[in-house]
Amino acid sequence: MDVILFLVFAIIAVVCAINVVVQTHPISSAVSLIGVMGSLAILYLLLGAEFIAAAQVIVYAGAVMVLFIFVIMLLNAGTEVRRGRSLMVQALGVPLLIALLGVLAFFVQRLYPQGTVHFGGFRGGTALAIGRALFTTYLLPFEITSILILIAIVGAIVLARKELD
Amino acid sequence: MIDSFVVITLIKVLVVFAVLMTTLAYLQWVERKVIAHIQVRPGPYRVGPHGLLQPLADVIKLVTKEDLVPPYVNKPLYLAAPFLAITMALLSISVIPFGPEISVAGHSTLMQLTDLNIGVVFVLAVSSMGVYGIALAGWASNNKYALLGGLRSSAQMISYELPLSLAIAAPLLISNTLSLRTLVERQSGSVLHWNVLHGPFPQIFSFIIFLIAAFAETNRVPFDLPEAENELVAGFHTEYSSMKFASFFMAEYANMITVSCMATLLFLGGWMAPWPAAYGSSLVPPAIFAIAGLIALYHGLNYARKRDKYTFPAFGVIFLIIAGIFLLPIVQAWLLPLFWFCAKTGAILFAFMWIRGTLPRFRYDQLMGFTWKFLFPVAMLNLLVTGFLVAWFS
């Protein structure tokens, strides 16, 4: 049952991810990205990290992607126009892609241990465990990240104001 | 063992689905009646006695109507949007607990479809996905009014989700759990243990913020700008007809039921009685039904219209029978919690209709200014005070 669910949602995630690139209209790409986020949440759930799964849906599939769609709708972005590809892209594109995938596969195999993954095996996924970890072990990275996000927000406002003046 | 689990779950799903669908249909009738009486007119009156068959007529009308797909729409998203809206609206009801654990014919089961240990977060996650139905419907319709409606609704729902989440977080600090069932069980006892009045910091402000944000999240008056008919024709569902329109309509009412249930569970103690059964709280429901039955019988004896001679006594007898059922010890274990849950949820639903019949619509800049400049800081302050007091007293 777990394996079937994993396969179904892994395939959905990959197909949606490819669709993000293939689609020419920004809204269709954004909708495919929502599909990726949603399937990733279900994969987290299969591993036993239910709180992370819910947070993934709330933050990424919910808030972030709603903003994406909102901005695309607001700017009324049209369909991408496909221009003729340059000779270099046509010649080097496919070989470079295969080389990149090969390098990625090599490093993934090298860096990660060969052990098996158990469905529902992750035990640190409760709200309690994540809260503990965030406010004790990882307090400094957590706070630095929030400062970073604050800087980004202030920067966005400054950039937007310059345009208004 | 697994077989009985599957069978019980299937039965529960069927019962909850049937009850929810009937409630959805009749909620609309109740709303039309309530608003009609607020505006001093009788409301639906033609189809069946007091318009009671009106929902059935509406369903038949919506199902048999021509299903029109305009030629200029983005077809896949146009078709997916109502489906998404209704799915997300119905999904959250699956974690709402209606009552305690009960045992029927030797099988003990929860009065809830599934008990998640992250139930509160699950409802938030599903409701945050619900906005796509409206936003995509507005965009895919390829119509300026629909697009404006979709834009307004996504902006409004993103903005009001913040105070909503902060208002939910405060009672969670007091109850110290994310499971909706445990949340209710920690509020047992009396009305003073409900989160809305529970120490160290009564969550009355959270409750009010939650209700205001919930009105905006469900696109209800006074925040129904996505479908402001005097500016936007019908907003995001302008281009939808027949069952697709009905899906949006049902999604709105299902969301109303969900947020009312959430308010009941988070702040009003769920299915818990307002005071212990030892002091007679179990006698309140039969007393209410008995009084209603006696009043109906009285009006049946002193009838004003000829048909009242038969209808009023019939209803009086039905009410008295219900009062009698509430006194049976066998059914009290599940009927009393269900009564209190429905009474609290119904009261909040009535408030939804009451406010729709009372308040005018906000202007768009007022709507946004209100949430960002007032509701959000107040919710933040409330959460901070609650956090400090909980830490202080624990």
Image (cartoon, helix red, strand yellow):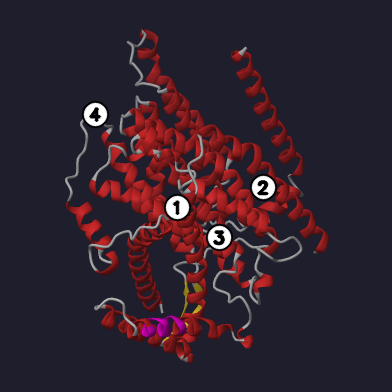
- Nearest-to-viewer mark from 4 and 2: 2
Residue B176: x and y, percent?
68, 62
Residues under numbered marks 4 and 2 in contact, where contact means CB atoms less than 8 Å apart: no
Q: Are marks 1 and 4 on the same chain?
A: yes
Q: Are marks 4 and 2 on the same chain?
A: yes
Relative to B291, does residue A130 appear above or below in the rendering?
Answer: above
Q: Earlier in the sequence, mark 2 or mark 3?
A: 3
Q: Nearer the viewer, residue B193 or A93?
A: B193
List the residue tagged with mark 3: B263
CA gap between label 4 and label 2 equals 43 Å
Which segment did they paint magenta? B291-298
x 51%, y 49%: residue: B215
**Mark 4 residue type:** Tyr
List the residue tagged with mark 2: B379
Q: Are marks 2 and 1 on the same chain?
A: yes
Quarter of the image for the C terminus of chain A: give it.
top right
